[in-house]
Structures are given as structure tokens and as C-alpha cells.
Image (spheres, helix red, strand yellow):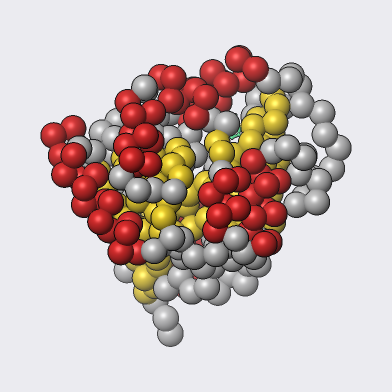
Amino acid sequence: MVCILNMVAPAKINLSIDVLGRRSDGYHQVAMVMQTIDLADLVTVSIGKTDTPIILRGGSLEAPPDTNNLVYRTAALVREQANLSIGVEIDLEKRIPVAAGLAGGSSDAAATMKAMNRLFHLGWSEEKMETLLAELGSDIPFLVRGGTALATERGEQVHILPEPPEFWVILVKPPFGVSTPQVYKALGAKSLPDPFSWTGIMTRDTVPDGTFTKKMISAIDQGSYTALIVAMGNDLEKVTLEWHPELKELKKRLIRLGCDQSLMSGSGPTILGFVEVENKARQIAEQMAEETRRSNYRVMVAGLRSSKGDV
Ligand code: C5P
């Protein structure tokens, strides 16, 4: 009998984000293309050996192993929904920066539910897990399957897309975090229609013309790296780059060092640089690390991670 599972919880990046309007429930209507990469946390989940319902160890200073941690909240949700009387023990090894626009906590949550589903033989479908996880955060459902997907509504509706052409990404994380609710609020106050009226769930065929996301889906369908680079865009940059002008400089610096494109991930502050081959990504990352050493920036390199296999 399997009683321990080692899960890989990959980070996500956004290849496009369009914020289309404010909704009456306080969220924003989005259309975005999400992609998992091979930077990942490790989540080890085992059947509990004691009477304690949930034991969570590890984490980090910014994501401590307490009851607010998304991993803890997911384990509590699974125990409640499945009426489990047996306890669960979870070890969380953080490698993805926290509050960085990379969905690290969300991915840990998805990995936790998938592991508990298997360990306790719950027989939950991916759709059921996506529905449950949407209650804990808009970007968590995507991380159940990962790979490449269009996310719509508040981000919780996931439509799988084909794999894009291969590329590599350089990630630069400044030594501060950004609050997603504050970024959305500032953007909403600036420029958006209110409330957003849309009937039915937006799919790849109904993403509005002229959006980054529409162009990105077409670039992925074509399998063209050049089209992908041209299509990229993130509406949330309008807020976060204004608040932190040094992020604009980072984007410029990545291009100067040879990246084909540069974009903020999620609500930031991580800035991404894109290139086609691994060697070039590593060279640029080395130079970037050298140039930013004194500013305490974290520089990482990652390739794509498809949806297959998570143990
Ligand atoms: O869904 P999640 O809890 O991750 O979202 C955090 C906050 O970000 C929400 O409470 C909301 O303020 C904002 N948000 C939004 N529109 C979205 C997603 C998030 O306004 N589509």
C-alpha cells in the first residue's frame, strides 16, 4: 500500500494577461495564457502516524507552515469534504519565490489535493479537484493539470492548449513582494468597464479580438516562437511597473543582454526574459546575476514543463 507521495509542484508563468473588466462579485474578468515551468517546490505527503489531523513541516520564512498556509487549508478542505478520520503529514520544500507572480503557494495546494486524492483513494476527478480548489484561489485550478492553458472568468476556468514551441525563461525576482488584490484594485479604479457583462463561459473561440491572449493562442497554434514573442503582453504591468519603476529598468536590461522579449509574470514583481535556447538563457542569467548582485535580486533559469507526470 502506498503511504507516501513525493509531488513536484511547478511554478507558472503568464504568457499573456488581459483584464477585461470588473465583475459584480468584486473579481475581474480575465483571459490569460498560463504555462508551467521546471522551477518547482517539493511536497511530500504521507498518511498520518498520530492522531493529529494535519501536520505541516518546512515552508519558509515568507510561507511558514501554519494554518494560514494554502497547503494546510487544502488539507483541511480535503479532510472535511472526504470525511477523513485519518491524519495527514506534509513536508513542504520551497524553491519558488513567495508573492512573486509565480503561483508557488497555489501549486503547493494543487499538489497537496492530488496527493491526498491518491493516498486516501478518494477517486476524485480532475474536474472535481479544480472546482474545490477554485474556492481557495483563482489560479489554483490550472495547476491541477498544468502544462499550457487558457484561463478565463476570474482565472479558474481552464481550457487546455497545445504545447508551445520550446523556449527558455530567465526569471528575476526583486527582494520585495506585491499584493495581487491591490494591483487589481488599482487597475480597476483606473480604466475598466464596470460591471463586466458577459454571458456564458469564455472559451478559446470567444476570447475578444485584439487581446494579447487571442494573439498568443494563435501563435501557439502556429507553433511559431517569433509569433509568441510578438504576442506577449500583461495588462497588470500598467500598475506594478508604475509602482516600482526599477522593474521597467529590469525589463530593458534583459533585452539589452540579448533576450527576445521581457514580461512581468502575474501581478509581479518577477520579471521574465525569453530566449529560444538553454545556453543563451544561462549566459544571460549569469550576467544578470553579476549586475544585480548588490541589489539582492534572485536570478533563475527554467525550461517548460508539460502537464505529464508530477511525482
Ligand atoms: O482568487 P484569489 O484569492 O487568488 O485572488 C486574490 C485577490 O485578487 C481577490 O480577492 C481579488 O481582489 C483579486 N482578483 C481579482 N480578479 C481576479 C483574480 C483576483 O480582482 N480575476
Classify residue 130 by image quadrant. bottom right
Q: Is residue 257 something that shows in the picture?
A: yes
Q: Given the current orientation, which residue lies at the most extreme bottom position?
A: 1
- Rendered-image quadrant of the C terminus: bottom left
Locate residue 42, reporting x and y percent. Answer: 34, 62
Please tell me whether residue 2 is drawn above or below residue 38 in the rendered image.
Answer: below
Instruction: Residue 136: give x, y in percent of width and height.
Output: 55, 43
Q: Quadrant of the N terminus?
A: bottom left
Q: Position of residue 140 (x, y in %)?
A: 54, 49
Ligand number 1: quarter of image: top right
Left or right placement of residue 110 versus residue 293 in this view: right
- Tell me if I can see residue 47 in this picture: no
Residue that sits furthest to the left in the current view: 294
Q: In this view of the protein, which residue sits in the foreground, 264 or 138?
A: 264
From the viewer's perspective, is 308 left or right of 50? right
Q: Is residue 143 left or right of residue 53?
A: right
Farthest top residue?
189
Q: Position of residue 304 (x, y in %)?
A: 45, 63
